[in-house]
Amino acid sequence: MNADARQDFAFAFLSILFEGAPFILVGTLISGFIDVYLPAGTMDRFLPKNRNLAVMVAGLLGAVFPVCECAVVPVIRRLVGKGLPMSCALTYMLAAPIVNPITALSTWKAFQGQAPWMMTGGRLLLGYLVAVGVGLVVARIPLRKVLRKSLADRIEAEGRGGHADHDHDHDGCCGHDHAHHPADHAPADDGRLVAAMRSAMRDFVDVGVYFTIGVAITALFNTGIAPGAEWLDGLAGNPVAAPAALMALAFILSLCSTSDAFIAATLAKFTWGAKLAFLVFGPMLDVKLLFLYQTVMRRRFILGLGVALFVVIWGAAIVAQAWLMNVR
Amino acid sequence: MKPELRRILFSLAVLLWAAGLLYFHGSGRIVKYLAPDFRSIALLGGLGLAVMGLFNLLTAFQKADCGHNHGEEDDHEGGELNPLVTLLMMTLPLAMSIAWTKDEFSQATLARKGLYDDGAAADASLFTSDLPPLTIAEIEKGHRKTADGYLEFGLIELFFATGDRELQGLLGGLKIETEGRIVAEKENNEKGTRRRLYRMFMTCCVADSRAIPIVLEFGKEPPLLPENGWVKVAGTMTFPKRDGIVQAVLEVDRATAAEVPAEENFLRR
């Protein structure tokens, strides 16, 4: 990299980092406090008994329990282990990083001057519909075809079977295994604050690492340093190829949903539909999530889920872009 | 790695990010990177990170009982990566970028961001709110006049007039003064009498910025002015067509070096 390229990279890198870091902080503070203070059973109690209705409500729980995609996987892993239906857990896992107030605010803020309400509304709506669609399909698939063998064994051994039985047995305080001693529920407010701040810091650095990598790659493309930047630019105006290209980019960048809008907003040459695809697909599947999902789900299911998400979101982005062009 | 050491390393990573944000804000350099409303968010973010980092650093050796019995899976703070690797990955790119940055883009990236693009027809609809009123009387009312009779215009108004025929008719032939940064004109400049004037237009951060240029025609050898320096130019506005594209060309009467304005970039209001 020559001196000019270093200067350009640094200028773009710092601007995106400074812009996104405060939003990651807000997201991880909330997730840290949820991690420590929120009992796991709380979410279960929000869900109706009807299976389809429960999936639809699960898609909205991110509005009440906002977590980004990095934080949501460990949470649903515990919730599934405690008997939350897999369809609801998966719906929540896919929707929560998008359908939550922090992501909505950061998307709206990042797209100032670029039809922010339309992009924010489109992102939330498409994210919700895709997540609920996946949940409704998963509700009809046997648990063993979805979950890792060890997790499925444990659930079946405990006789829960992954259905919405709502038999709260007081083992879920905040997503942790408890030994049913009275001391487990003893208040420890000072310690909890420290634990919450530590949890928030853990989330911040976990997300911060991936965000740094994502910002670096974006800065390389933004300033034309990265190989393939010209090729990517060439696809920018193509209503069919552009969404696929940006979905592939979102997969590689592995950005946090609380800050990815700041990257998408800089992709000025790309169509609106392509940016929408980037913002919906990225929080549902990327490189880091591929690894995280394997702690809960079978590899074959993840592959199928990935293909389905790609095709559905790609198609939706093309249709949305065509609709937008007609309206204009 | 001991949990206490891990907490210290994570705290350091958070504190270094906080230091970066607060330093750029405190030094005033943040104005080159972020639009105004993001600057205060960055300040709050820097302060918040500083609180989080300091709190965790000062309580690194304190035992924290969250009220749960944990299995081996999660103690609320075990990260995905080695803490030392995490610290390096979070802070090295930041430190290197702070060392490398000159608070501006090179000419090559400016070219990529539209420095040598002419004509704004495709984007004009996005900026209609920035366009001036459509009668000469209203234009004169909305723009100050210099002592020698030139109307003061923002460069962005002149640039986006290339996408509006009515505005071209009103501004064409008008005596105007504007300011921006001056660079060489690369094409259609065989006689060497032309230069280019530009400013950046930023929506949220400088990564999403684009150059807003017009052409300066001196009619003779241009005066010696620092390359990429700030200048004030005054002259007659014209909108000739080149290869079917309308250009904004200012036939310059005078050009002088100028102070750097408080807000270098155009901002969306």
Image (cartoon, coloured by chain):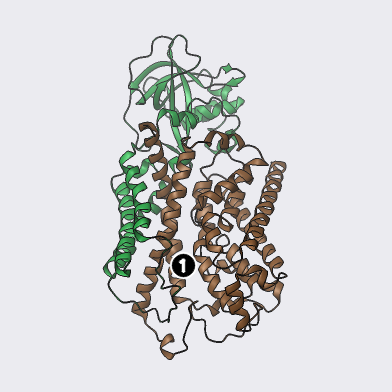
What residue is shown at x 60% (from left), y 43% (from top)?
A245
**Circle 1: element type:** helix
Residue sitting farthest toward the bottom: A182
Q: Depth check: give the residue in front, A89 or A323.
A: A89
Quadrant where the C terminus of chain A sits is top right
Q: Is residue B122 above or below residue A144?
A: above
Q: Depth check: give the residue in front, B71 or B153.
A: B71
Amino acid on which disc 1 is placed: Ser
Q: Is residue B173 above or below residue B85?
A: above
What residue is shown at x 32% (from left), y 62% (from top)?
B11
The reply to whether residue A161 is in sight is yes
The reply to whether residue B34 is in sight is no
Q: Which residue is mark 1?
A: A31
Query: Which chain does the residue under circle 1 lie in?
Result: A
Q: Quadrant of residue A151?
A: bottom right
Locate residue A325 relative to residue A94 in the image: left or right. right
Chain B hue? green
